Amino acid sequence: AQKITQTQPGMFVQEKEAVTLDCTYDTSDPSYGLFWYKQPSSGEMIFLIYQGSYDQQNATEGRYSLNFQKARKSANLVISASQLGDSAMYFCAMRPRTGTSYGKLTFGQGTILTVHP
Amino acid sequence: DSGVTQTPKHLITATGQRVTLRCSPRSGDLSVYWYQQSLDQGLQFLIQYYNGEERAKGNILERFSAQQFPDLHSELNLSSLELGDSALYFCASSVEPSGGRGSTDTQYFGPGTRLTVL
């Protein structure tokens, strides 16, 4: 079984500063994918970034980067130069790449990020 | 806009009723997934279809069923509704569950259907 833990229910950051959202995971699958999604107050789920368990380099997508530490089973999201529009709920998710649960995304509890002007 | 469409956006109904939620995947995507988001349970995987066939099942109640049609759109049927079924229901789609190391097989989510059971 897979488990995702996000220990920060809420985070605050000043506009233009960087912020790190924590995510740890637990899995027995040898191969897996890690994802971050953003859910604004409007409710939609927006894909931000992906990291494969075999990827040697940390993923980056614009202002988003994923700090992947496989031995520690952590996949923290770093948002640089925060903007007011970054205020939202952020979910970390994991999916095994093999087995009968291949398609199943397991989500963490989420972290609410508030960006102050 | 993810390219995944869901209808209706909002649905208000009474206990004991039956509703159907509809999802159209992104063009070219063969897999469709259904998720339920509620305050007490968080985001939960319900079921996955790939090219018309059921591929994986999660915590889906027996009162719930789904199918994927030949044109790849999917419907989630919820029956004998209870107050606790009130939630945001998401559909997501991906290209295919290829599993290859180079594949991200990212799931792109629709806007969701907010179901309120009174």
Image (cartoon, coloured by chain):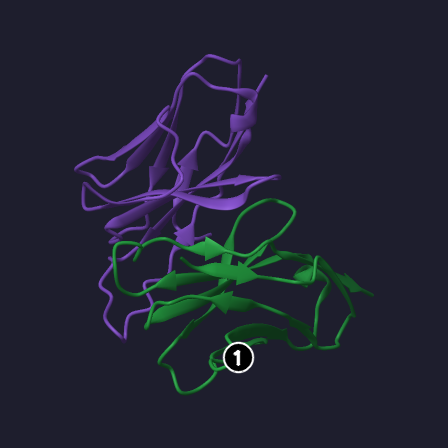
Work out whether residue B20 or residue A71 is closer to the camera in this orientation and state it.
A71
Question: Quick check: B84 above or below A108?
Answer: above
Task: Give the amino acid at mark 1.
Answer: Arg
Residue B98: percent from left, percent from top: 22, 63
Looking at the colours in the rendered structure, which chain would you say is drawn in purple? B
Q: Which chain is green?
A: A
The x and y percentages for residue B6 are 41, 37
Residue at 38% from the left image edge and 61% from the top image edge = A95
Q: Is residue A33 left or right of residue A117?
A: left
Residue at position x 77%, y 70% in the image: A15
Left or right side of B106 for A49:
right
Q: Is residue A59 above or below residue A116?
A: below
In the image, what residue occupies the spot 35% across and 80% down?
A: A54
Tell me the subunit letter for badge 1: A
Above-or-below relation of B66 to A48: above
**Residue B47 drawn at (x, y percent):** 33, 42
In this rendering, does residue A51 appear at all? yes
Which of the image's four quarters has the C terminus of chain B?
A: top right
Task: Identify which residue is drawn at 45% across, 13% down.
Answer: B17
SS of the residue under disc 1:
loop
- Residue where numbered disc 1 is placed: A72
Q: B66 or A85: which is nearer to us?
A: B66
